[in-house]
Every structure is written in C-alpha cells, then in structure tokens.
Amino acid sequence: MQNVKVIIWGLGAMGSGMAKMLLNKKGVDIVGAVGRGAKLGKSMYEIIGVERGDRPEVLIGTPEDVIKEKSADVVLCCTDSYTKVAFDRLKFCLERKINVISSAEEMAYPQAQSPEHAKQLDEIAKANGVSILGTGINPGLIMDLLVVVMTGCCESVDHIVSRRVNSLSPFGPTVMHEQGIGITVDEFKKGVETGTLAGHVGFEESIHMIADAIGWNVEKVTTSMDPIVTDVDRKSPYGFAAAGNVAGVAMKGFGYIDGELKIEMDHPQQIEPEQVGVQTGDYVIIKGTPNVNMVNSPEVPGGIGTIAMCVNMIPQIINARPGLQTMISLPVPRAIMGDMRELIEPECKIVK
Amino acid sequence: MQNVKVIIWGLGAMGSGMAKMLLNKKGVDIVGAVGRGAKLGKSMYEIIGVERGDRPEVLIGTPEDVIKEKSADVVLCCTDSYTKVAFDRLKFCLERKINVISSAEEMAYPQAQSPEHAKQLDEIAKANGVSILGTGINPGLIMDLLVVVMTGCCESVDHIVSRRVNSLSPFGPTVMHEQGIGITVDEFKKGVETGTLAGHVGFEESIHMIADAIGWNVEKVTTSMDPIVTDVDRKSPYGFAAAGNVAGVAMKGFGYIDGELKIEMDHPQQIEPEQVGVQTGDYVIIKGTPNVNMVNSPEVPGGIGTIAMCVNMIPQIINARPGLQTMISLPVPRAIMGDMRELIEPECKIVK
C-alpha cells in the first residue's frame, strides 16, 4: 500500500502543528499545502520551520493548484471556525473526491447550528464516495465525546456538567486578541454586544452531540459570556492584563431537555490561572446510575490536543462510509504510534 | 420498526441486572431467557424479582427452546469469563443468525489469548451475516477503551499506567469466594498455585487492546497477584476478613513493547477500602505529548458498569458490519435515554 497522502489547507498554528506532527509519523506523506498571501509559492518546510532533508519539496499553492481529483487520501482543512464560512472550501475538497477533516469548531457537529449545510455536505460527500469529519480537542473530545463515553457505563443519566478550566497562557497574539485579554470591562461588554469577541465556539455543538448520542431532545440552548476580571497584574508570553482588566472569558452553556436544564457547560479560560490559585482541569460530572466524577488535571492543552485529534482521526475518516461523520459515528480516536497504513482498509484507500 | 428484540442467556447477577435495565428502556423487548437447573420453566420475572404487569410471559428455557433462527436482534450472553468456555454458546447464537454481546472478560479482546477462537468467531459471524462483541466495565471500558480515547489527544505516547482501585463490598458470596476474601495468606498462596483463585480476568485483553489500537506490538505480558492482607477486621455485606487475613487481591499486569515496559495495569480490589483510608478510583496516567492525568473517583461500580455497557452497546452491535467486533472497532458506548429503535439502522434490523 502507498503511504497515506495528506494535503493541509491552512498553515496557521493548527495546520503547521499538524504538518510537524505528520512529519514524525510512519506511513504518511504530506503531498500538498494550500495557503494564501505571502505564503504562496514558498516551501511548506520554510513556513513550518522544519528541515526538509531529503523529502520532496512541498510548495504552498492555491486550492486549484494543489487539490486535484483523488490526489490525496485526506485534506486537513484548518482555515475556519464556522461551518458556513468553511462550507465552500469543504465542498471544493469533497468534489475532488478526497476525504476531509475540518478543525472548524462548528463542524464538530454541524447538525447543531447549520443543519442545511450539514445535509448538503452529507449529500456532496456521498455523491463523491468520500467522507467528512469535524474534530478538535473541544468541541470534539473533552466537553462532548468524553462525556458520551462515560455515559456508556450508566444505566440512566439525569444531569450532566462538563467543565473545562484552562489556561490561555500558551496561546499567541491572535487568541489574546480574540479572547479580549488585557482590555477593560467596558471594552469587553462592547465586544460582546458587537460580536467582535468570539470567546469559545462550540457549546451548541457539544450539547447537541451529547443529547443526540444519548437520546435526549434539545429544546433550547442558551449561553453566557462574562469577563474574568483580575485582581492582580497577570502576564503570559503573549498577553498582559493589568489589575482591574480582563484576564479571560468565563463562558457557560445550558442545554434544556423537556423543560429541564440537563446539560451544563462551564468553560472559564484565562491567562495565568495558577497565579490566582485556579487549578486547571477537564471535568465530567454525571448524575445518574452510577454517578461519574472525573477530572483530568491539568487540562489537555488546547493547541496540541486539536492538532493530535485531527491527525489521529485520519484512519477513521478514510475507512468511514461515505457521508458526513461525527465523533459519535466513528470508532474512538487514538494515538498513532505505528505505521499509519496498518490502520487503513485497503478498499478505502484513495491513492492506491 | 418493531421493538428491538433481546434474548438473555444466563440469569445470574449480570444477566438479571441487564434484564431489569432493559425493562426500563423504550423500544426494546426481552423475548427470551435461557437458563438451567432449577430456573428452567420458571418465569423470568419471578427470577429477576420484577412484576410482570401486562408484559407477555417469558419462560426460562434451554438454548434449543429459546434461540431460534432470527428470533431476536441480539443475544446477551452472560454465562462465562473465558472465551474457550463460552465459544460453543456464542457459536450457537451466531449460527442462528442473531448478533451477540458477551460479558465474558476474555471476549473483550479474544485476539489476545484465543486468536484461533477469535478467527473462528469472526468467520462464523460473517458467514451468518451477524456480528459479535465482548464488553463490560473492565475489560471493556475503564482500563482499556478509556485509555485509548485519551491517547486520541496525544501527538505521541511513551508510557501508560491504567489503575483501578475498587471496592468489592457491593458484591455477593460468589465474588467473595472467587477473590479469596477472608482466607489466610497460606490458603491464598495455594489458591494462586492451583489456579482456583481467579482474581481479575482481563489484563491480557486490556493490554493487547490498547497496544493494537495505538500501533504498539506486544512482546509479552506478565501478571502478578498478591494478597491484600488487612491489619484490622473488615466486614462487608457478604464478606469478612479478620485482621491478618486476606481482604482483597492486588493484581498487576505489565505489557512489554520493544523490550520496554510501556503499559502497566494496577488493580487492587478489596472489601471496605475506606476503612483503611484507601480512596477508590479509576486512573488513566499517560506520559506523552501531552501528559494525561485523569481520575474518576470513586470508581465506576463493577456490577452496574458491566450491566450498562452490555445493554448500551446493543445498537452498535446490531448496526455493525458482520464479524467479530471490539470496543475499538465500533462507535463509542453511550447511555440510551430515548427509544432504542431510533439508534438502529433499518437495514440492520433482524426482526423486521
């Protein structure tokens, strides 16, 4: 069997990280990279900061240049957070008969907020004999799939709390800006009103994924977004929040089932949480038969986690039946420590 | 779609628990029960201690009486711990073209210790167009599948510790006897030598499942089994260990990959651990990129957990491709809070 052939669309922090991870794996080649602006025409190796060695050159090109019919087994599309923005790009890949993994948060469960786009992606994928999956650390694993797995040992479930208390300190300037690190409380409120502060994207997706998995019908989802105001100056590699200003965002999501609040998402993100005694961690708290009271502490880092999830699901999406897949329709994610080809069913390989 | 039709083979603690759980679920019927000895001819409802109400009677019968070709969508086979002992029963069900879920510990990954039986079951299942799965709380979820899931957010994995510190206090006289609760240290040693003390069955299965999932080749597995000697008298509902005698079993398993110890299983089981300050819990400790340091405390109770896992995997095994399946080849387990029929793909239903 030929090596698994991968194209990466988008060489920001996530796409570059996936490229670097793939270069350390056996049985897989990066055969194309799609970028834009100043990156066009440059070597992927230069952009991601890895010695090319004796590997064939990969020049960053436009989608039309790089993504030809059946030219790879999968495209990792790392360009967007929202399904409707990513849609045309995802369609472009599927129509070239290549499987797709998207890191767009909303694509982790596009049925939640973009059911029409989800339906179309399913149809386009099926028409072209390939499959598509959205994943990442969250949504994708921590606040949804992990919860679903733990309900698997329950005879019944009454109430779910999914909590992720994480540090934003490892992130760069873009995330500092998107999350409002260092701004005043007034600026934060304006940012929420005008929609310029994104905060976490994914509660709708996580709540619908959990509910659909266990057979609850979601009546409504509400969310809230509040500033985490710091009492002391906090400084991270790329962020600074003076005392009295915003050091993070406390986001909550509430899923109502049959008139009752049954799924709660609690996700405070901030720089330097340790400085103020906040212990980070991922929590799954299920009231049911039996109760589950699980914590992973410190939290799985968001960047590495998303990179790993997207790469590690490559075999599953290649092997999947055609159509739109989700983390609850595929076998579980897992690290790939051997030759990636050993995980691929020969009849599902695109580049034979 | 007709309700999902289930036959239960074996009405001990596990089978009876599954029956009770199923009676509380929507879209599913118990259409047969297989037992032996004094239970033959009696009402299943009498044996499990549930009012029949207006449900049709289910009389406990022999396998030949109850399991007719395509007479159910799945048989839950709760009779054994070992693949080679369960084999003929599992074959009997598959040849009657019915899917099977087995609670036998070794069946959670029969490839580990009975590769020839595993191959035969796969072939028999495929020849009859049905599928078969072994599962339970452990092996099946806690010390293996949950570990695999958490490797999914890792770029690489160096070393794994899977630890389950659990209480035997909820269990009945059979488990007290099998685990040697209350016997002397000399009796324990003799029991280990003669193989009459089973301890935990499943390390080989868990280690091979994890290793196969992430692409490690297991060179060898070793296990150890030591008495947990109590300093104080301990009393549980069905067990008693006087000071100086055996209050539990400390089992360890070691999986070697490329000459290195890479997978460690640590599973001390005892009555009344709280009495001596032992906090029970399920631990997943991964050294890798990133590290994972997860605990669920107290542990998922073994009895309820196994009952729930076997019932909750019914939709997945009905929907599965024909053949021998495992927890790493199927979509994740999940609680079933809605109508079970909504989880079944119509073309996979046996009793249409």
Image (spheres, coloured by chain):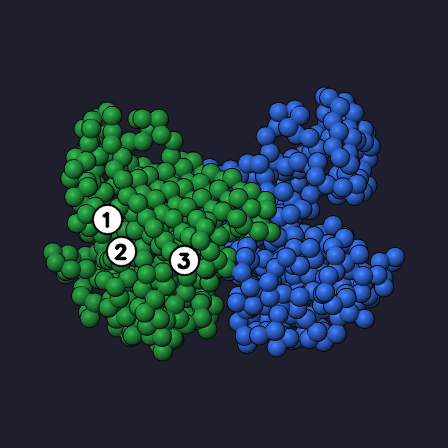
Chain colours: A green, B blue
Check whether the beta carbons of the residues at disc 1 and disc 2 lie within 8 A of each other.
yes
Judge the density around disc 1: few (<14), some (14-19), many (≥20) Cα neighbours within 10 Å.
some
Choose mark 3 or mark 1, whichever is in front: 3
Vertical side of B288 occupied by B115: above or below: below
Cα gap from disc 1 to disc 2, whole angstroms: 10 Å
Give the residue type at disc 2: Ser
Up the image or down, A97 lies above or below B326; here it is below
The C terminus of chain A lies in which quarter of the figure? bottom left
Mark 3 → mark 1, Cα distance in angstroms: 24 Å
Q: Residue at coordinates 54% horizontally, 74% vertically from top-left? A: B346
Q: Nearer the viewer, residue A167 or B288?
A: A167
Please name whichever residue, A120 or B213, is drawn nearer the observer in this view of the structure.
Answer: A120
Q: Using the image, name the chain to which the residue with label 3 belongs.
A: A
> Which chain is mark 2 on?
A
Q: Nearer the viewer, residue A209 or A323?
A: A209
**Residues beneath discs 3 and 1 located on the same chain:** yes
Place of residue A327 in the rendered image (x, y in percent of width and height, measured from the top left): 43, 58
Q: Is residue A268 above or below residue B25?
A: above
Q: Circle 1 is placed at which residue position?
A: A198
Secondary element at tag 2: loop
Q: Quadrant of the N terminus of chain A?
A: bottom left
Q: Chain of mark 1?
A: A
Which of the 4 image quadrants contains residue B67?
A: bottom right
Mark with earlier residue (3, 2): 2
Pinpoint residue A105: horizontal percent, then vertical percent: 31, 55
